[in-house]
Amino acid sequence: MSQSASLMGFVHRRRRGAELLLLVLALAVGIGAYAAVGLGVEGVVPTDLVGYGGWLTALILAAHVTMRLTAPYADPVLLPVVAAINGLGLAVIHRLDLAKEAAGRPHDFAQQQLTWMTLGVVLFIAALVVLRDHRVLQRFTYTFGLAAIVLLLLPLVPGLGTEKNGARIWILVGPFSFQPGEVAKVLLVVAFAGYLVPHRDALALAGRRLLFLDLPRGRDLGPILAMWLVSLGVLVFQRDLGSSLLFFGLFLVMLYVATERPGWLVLGTGLFALGAFAGYTAFAHVQTRVDVWLRPMDFYSDADGAKSFQIVEALFGMGWGGLIGRGFGGGSPDRVPFAESDFIVAAIGEELGLTGVIAVILLYGLIVERALRTALICRDGFGKLVALGLGSVFALQVFVVIGGVTKLIPLTGLTTPFLSYGGSSLVANWVIIALLSRISDQARRPVPDLSVPDDSDSDTTQVVKLPS
């Protein structure tokens, strides 16, 4: 056996065959759930099952083929997990559409979501084809940062921004509404990573020591104070508690990992607690969120609009679902307002039970785990921080959404990635998966042994394996 052949066993394999097998299972989840909805609600298999299943299969196979051609060493688990979550979300949204149609309030959210998924997969493919090296993004650090701030401010522009469900986080472009914060979170991850890589040594310098903790120097507090003010601005002017927590938490996690200084975590947590307390004492909408969280039954039949109707109905539904759920068609998830978006986890808990909710959480955990694994094996600091940041986006967003639905924390208004109805969120999250795939492809590629001289007559290539 040649030296090249012996070394090949120590490099990451492409694993596209394993990805294809997992994609078959993911498609079985999505298409099977769609068929189960028809059987459970109407007693027959949906008439459009072949067309729906064929289109879903075509989208996922197109993404898989693109991975084979442009990112052959990318993580083989990311795409199947996303396909399974997205397929399940489409089926649950279709279930809610049928319930509303039976109640005389017809909607076609599932068809619209499939259209948004198509656009998301197209952008996933375009990102992999156009972006062949993630390190190119570091050149646009401040451009992306400025663009993210502009996007966050757009909903405040009169005539352009609009308020929905008490939060001013949407803009109207013709007949379409768009949530710019979903794009801003991707740009912020790249901007944070690009800023922290060259400045982390200075930010890691210790200042005063308090007990057993080295606090940062006063001169280095500018970035965290700026992000604190931005997050407070989102909370105050846009009334969006979820995005405020997401953006500040994201920056704090990336700052801590880049500097390895626990003092930043303590300082950041203190700043957020101070801002949250100030927001609670100064703004009625924050007080309402907290009061509804602490005493939901007191507001369930409130004369001015039953402020806790959503959360109480969601808790009733999940309690009725129990461990294994009522089955598709056996519950009444449409009783919860906006069940297809903010409270889709409650619909899953009612009809698929605690088992279904745990399965969904585990799938999200796999995405975060694969992102952190990619960050660990990535060879450049910028890629490490971007992968970490993108994984943190999923972790924080899923925590605040499911935590709000289950009354662990106050409701925040974020969407559940790939699961909830919403075009802005779905498209942005498909781009995030494309970026993670590109970074993992670069990280898992075999590295040429530079100690071996280049011989054009040789038909072998020696590679070495970085520790994983």
Image (cartoon, grey):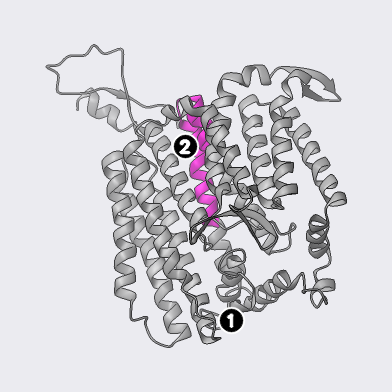
Under tag 2, what secondary structure?
Answer: helix
- The quarter holding residue 28 reads bottom left
- Which residue corresponds to the image point at 82% horizontal and 25% vertical from the top-left? 212
Under tag 1, what secondary structure?
Answer: loop
Give the percent coordinates (x, y) of residue 207.
78, 18
- Which residue corresponds to the image point at 59% horizontal and 54% vertical from the top-left? 170
Q: Residues within 10 Å of mark 2 (few under 14, many from 20)?
A: many
- Which residue corresponds to the image point at 78% horizontal and 60% vertical from the top-left? 289
Give the percent coordinates (x, y) of residue 95.
49, 76
- Indicate whether 429 appears above or below 353: above
Give the percent coordinates (x, y) of residue 29.
41, 66
Going by the image, does 307 lie left or right of 64? right
In this view, the mark in front (2 or 1) = 1
Q: Nearer the viewer, residue 99 or 204?
A: 99
Q: Is residue 72 visible?
A: no
- The quarter holding residue 269 reads top right
User: Mark 2–mark 1 contact, CB under 8 Å?
Assistant: no
Going by the image, does 402 lie left or right of 28? right
Q: Nearer the viewer, residue 333 or 2?
A: 333
For the residues labelled 2 and 1, the Cα–Cα distance comes to 40 Å
Q: Tag 2: residue type?
A: Thr
Q: Tag 1: residue type?
A: Gly
Magenta segment: does it hold 275? Answer: no
Residue that lies at the very extreme toward the left in this rendered image: 457
- The quarter holding residue 7 reads top left
Residue corresponding to mark 2: 374
Residue corresponding to mark 1: 331
* Sequence-first disc among 2 and 1: 1
Q: Is residue 291 visible?
A: yes
Q: Which residues are magenta?
A: 362-387
Going by the image, does 246 lie left or right of 104? right
Magenta segment: does it hold 379? Answer: yes
